[in-house]
Image: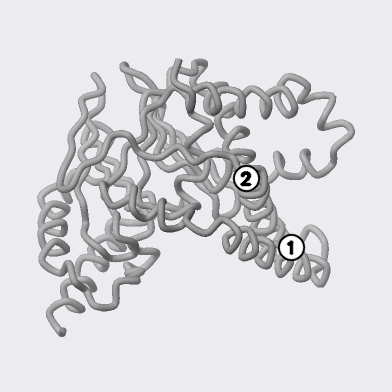
């Protein structure tokens, strides 16, 4: 067995033993763990697809004839270990085949290693993005520590169990788990299946159609479409009302944007459900507005 697989297996096993096998015992004496579990939301998109959210942390799981597909993997191994157990219970199985990273930001690949048996799919630029983000562990640890401290101060100043408090609590918990991964040198499982333009995978009763959008929110944004389920996953490319999230201010890949939008428009008639990278369900109107916004922005330059 490869060394990295052994490491990931041990991480998952230790997390499972400390927080899974003794779940009844832990929850009775650990109010923090109980609070985290109470704030994890599970939404059934269809018989084959579920959406799991913890504040801004989100992933989707799709049950197919050839195994379970996970779209994005959350920010940390600790939280994603909880999500994995939910998926196993919902689908009564653990045959995880693929994890697809919608782009190369830490809050989408941090939990990759929890799916020890799965292969990770991402755009080829994911590898470079992940390497750059992990290049300075000391700086990363300090930044995460500062974020946790900031949310801790906000939490102390907010009224307990209000909507605002829950939002701050989930954010603090997310970054605290990411901090713990960085502090404990938990290895990041990187994509081992990459593509530069398009990739299709046949899962028996579901087809995964993926296309590189071009440099926009990140350098590795992809769209994931499942025609049999009429679902489109958009990562962090846009939010409600079609508001684009563009970090590449130079718009260096405008031609690719146009190609990707044409790809979307060819499938638009069959797209019923649109899910973004943080678990929000978007509308077809949002998608159409995004297409128009992107075209207008790129044509004005």
Q: Residue at x 27, y 60 (%)?
A: 287
Position of residue 63 measured from the top left corner of the image (x, y, whole percent): 39, 24
Residue under pointer 1: 165
Between residue 139 and residue 244, name the one nearer to us.
139
- How many neighbours does mark 1 have within 10 angstroms: few (below 14), some (14-19), or many (20 or more)? some
In the displayed structure, would residue 196 be above or below residue 162? above
Between residue 79 and residue 168, name the one nearer to us.
79
Taking the image as drawn, is residue 274 in sight?
no
Numbered disc 2: secondary structure:
helix
Q: Residue at x 19, y 47 (%)?
A: 211
Position of residue 156 measured from the top left corner of the image (x, y, whole percent): 83, 67
Position of residue 104 measured from the top left corner of the image (x, y, whole percent): 38, 52
Taking the image as drawn, is residue 72 in sight?
yes
Position of residue 230 measured from the top left corner of the image (x, y, whole percent): 26, 39
Disc number placed over residue 181 in the picture, else none: 2
In the displayed structure, would residue 163 be above or below residue 45? below
Q: Quadrant of residue 70?
A: top left
Farthest right residue? 29
Disc number placed over residue 185 in the picture, else none: none
Q: Residue at x 18, y 47 (%)?
A: 196
Q: Quadrant of residue 20?
A: top right
């Amino acid at each position: 067995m490869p060394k990295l697989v052994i490491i990931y297996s041990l991480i998952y096993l230790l997390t499972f033993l400390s927080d899974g096998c003794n779940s009844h015992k832990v929850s009775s004496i650990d109010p923090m763990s109980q609070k985290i579990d109470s704030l994890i939301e599970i939404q059934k998109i269809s018989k084959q697809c579920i959406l799991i959210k913890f504040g801004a942390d989100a992933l989707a799981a799709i049950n197919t004839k050839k195994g379970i597909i996970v779209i994005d993997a959350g920010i940390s191994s600790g939280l994603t270990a909880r999500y994995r157990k939910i998926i196993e219970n919902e689908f009564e199985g653990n045959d995880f085949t693929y994890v697809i990273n919608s782009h190369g930001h830490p809050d989408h690949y941090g939990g990759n290693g929890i799916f020890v048996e799965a292969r990770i799919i991402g755009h080829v630029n994911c590898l470079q993005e992940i390497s750059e983000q992990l290049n300075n562990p000391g700086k990363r640890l300090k930044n995460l520590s500062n974020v946790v401290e900031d949310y801790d101060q906000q939490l102390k100043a907010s009224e307990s169990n209000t909507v605002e408090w829950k939002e701050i609590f989930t954010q603090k918990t997310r970054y605290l788990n990411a901090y713990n991964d960085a502090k404990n040198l938990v290895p990041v499982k990187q994509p081992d299946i990459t593509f530069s333009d398009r990739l299709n995978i046949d899962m028996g009763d579901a087809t995964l159609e993926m296309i590189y959008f071009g440099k926009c929110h990140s350098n590795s944004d992809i769209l994931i479409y499942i025609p049999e389920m009429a679902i489109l996953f958009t990562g962090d490319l846009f939010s409600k009302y079609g508001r684009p999230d563009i970090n590449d201010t130079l718009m260096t890949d405008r031609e690719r944007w146009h190609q990707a939008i044409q790809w979307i428009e060819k499938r638009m008639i069959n797209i019923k459900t649109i899910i973004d990278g943080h678990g929000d369900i978007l509308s077809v109107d949002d998608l159409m507005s995004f297409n128009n916004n992107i075209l207008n922005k790129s044509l004005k330059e």
